[in-house]
Image (tube, coloured by chain):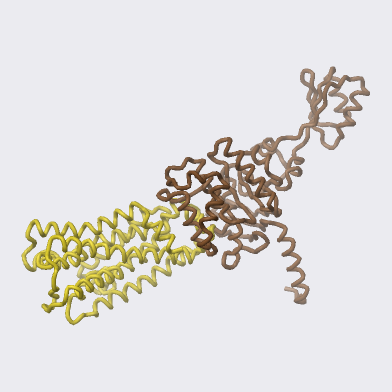
Chain colours: A brown, B yellow
Amino acid sequence: MSPSPPSRLRRRASAEERAVAELAIATNGLTKHFGDLAAVDGIDLAVPAASVFGFLGPNGSGKTTTIRMLLGLIAPSAGDWSLLGEEMPSPGLRTLLRVGALIEGPAFYPWMSGRENLARLDAAGPDGRRRSRASRIDAALARVGLTVAAGRKYRAYSLGMRQRLGLAAALLRPRDLLVLDEPTNGMDPQGTREIRTLVRELAADGTTVFLSSHLLSEVEQVCTHVAVMANGKLLAQGTMAEIRSVGAARLRCEVDDPARAAQVLTRLGLGDVEATGEEVSALLADAAPERCNRELVEAGIGVRSLVTERPSLEDLFVALTGEGFDVAR
Amino acid sequence: MLLAELQAMFRRTRIRVLLVVLMAVPFLLSVAVRVSGGPNPGGGPTFLDRVSHNGVFAALAGLVVTVPFFLPLTVAVVAGDAIAGEASLGTLRYLLARPAGRARLLGTKSAGIVVFCVVAALAVALGGLIGGAIFFPLGRVVTLSGTTISLAAGIGRTALAALVVAGSLLGLGAIGLFISTMTDVPVGAMAGTVGVAVLSAVLESVPEVSFLHPWLFTQGWLSFTDLLRVPLQWGAIRHDLLLQLGYIAVFGSAAWARFTTKDVLA
């Protein structure tokens, strides 16, 4: 314990606060043990404000446990976290009022209608003004396209309608952060498109969307940032571009003489050179594709096409989480 | 929030059926007495022999009949379901993320149980009054002490008896709430609560543990019959209600300690 002048301490604290405020979610060594199992093992999430953050991982990787910890449903074994710049758990739960959530699928009372269920949830919080409740509920129902079915019992809802009602609950008031766990689960393609549009609209309004999903194409289309979890550990996180650049790009050319082209590429220092049929491909590493093209042409090889292939998010996901693939952790 | 809680509770078919059955018990009792002519004076459960003279006693006899088992059963259903039911539906995580606040949610659930106890006991009394009024004359009420009070006073005392019964059930309600925080399986919590009530009743009938008897939460369940004495004898009722308060304090705190720290995984 070194005696620090109070003023310096204060300055440091405020600087840290500012750094944290730019992050909608920040975790520091967040850990949860269930018995011997480390369901979540010291993860440091950094979700920038106003991002659409894709949270990926195979089943049982610790995503849902993480989400439950973020929302204060389960207490971490170690580590701490902050939401929207406030240390959690915040006094009086005020931070959670700015957070909407869809956690592991929707859950409502089957014996009440969609509208009654939303009213019940709205009334359960400390900030639900009764006078404006009906208009809040109408707006949320309209936003997810459930107005017509609002009076029907939840029991009679289809899976997609239930999912929509769950989203409506998350959108009952303006939110600064939305935590959506598998929001398109059970939805038809039309519904999936609507959700995608909805997420984009929300993000455009400055809402941070934390989106946990198995649908990689979905994530690829809407997310600006990605994190990948497996076995309770955070394997990678960053902007979509950063994450995709993790995977090695591959040069693929159609040539008239694949055997000689392979020699040229090997001479240029490219790895894993493969010549098949009329095609030659190699790991690009840090070589410039322009230079490869020039060298091939100068060697008298006819180049019909030349492309640089970045791995898809799915390739990366499998590479990061699948077994037997040696990715630097 | 309590209003929303009560709406969710009383909109449920299960709860409505329970209340209807609670009303039906004393009503059917009146029918039975009417058809059979009733037990001989002094026979059958307390008050039952008086029903044919005065319908008001159908309500009191209804309370006497339902207090040992049926009323506690309904309280166990509601209290056991309080937290475990929300957990099994998954609504618990949404209520907490709303955020409802754990202590606040538990307080609302407790208040909901109290309201249910009152409504359930009043339902029995009301069913009895209706049945009694249909099948028997209503009139001045002869108390257990042999004196007579007016019909209005008699109905007033019946209502008071229902409230005392509701109060007597609160200890069980607190036990049920505590058990409900321990599990995500509502049926288990309900069965556990009924089990505790049965255990208490069994202990009450075992003379070897007579030192325990004054502390069993079931021991004063029939103390409300003292309301039919003139002058009113409050001793047993006071002891019963104080005992219930003790149970509420112990099991309410336990429920609070458990619920405010528990990991919600459902």
Quarter of the view holding residue B114: bottom left
Question: In the image as oriented, which residue stretches furthest toward the bottom?
Answer: B231
> Which of B158/A82 is in front?
B158
Quarter of the view holding residue B143: bottom left
x then y, percent, for residue A26: 67, 57
Query: In this rendering, would B35 be left or right of B204?
Result: left
Asked whether the viewer can see residue B111, the reply is yes
Asked whether the viewer can see residue B219, the reply is no
Question: In the image as oriented, which residue stretches furthest toward the right?
Answer: A298
Quarter of the view holding residue B206: bottom left
x then y, percent, for residue B19: 29, 57
Count of marks placed on residues? 0
> Which of B164/A231 is in front?
B164
Image point 69% across, 46% down: which residue?
A: A226
Is residue A212 depicted above or below A293 in this figure?
below
Is residue A10 depicted above or below A120 in this figure?
below
Image point 39% across, 72% down: which residue?
A: B249
x then y, percent, for residue A117: 46, 53
Image point 58% across, 54% down: which residue?
A: A100
x then y, percent, for residue A146: 52, 45
Query: In this rendering, would A235 be left or right of B225?
Result: right
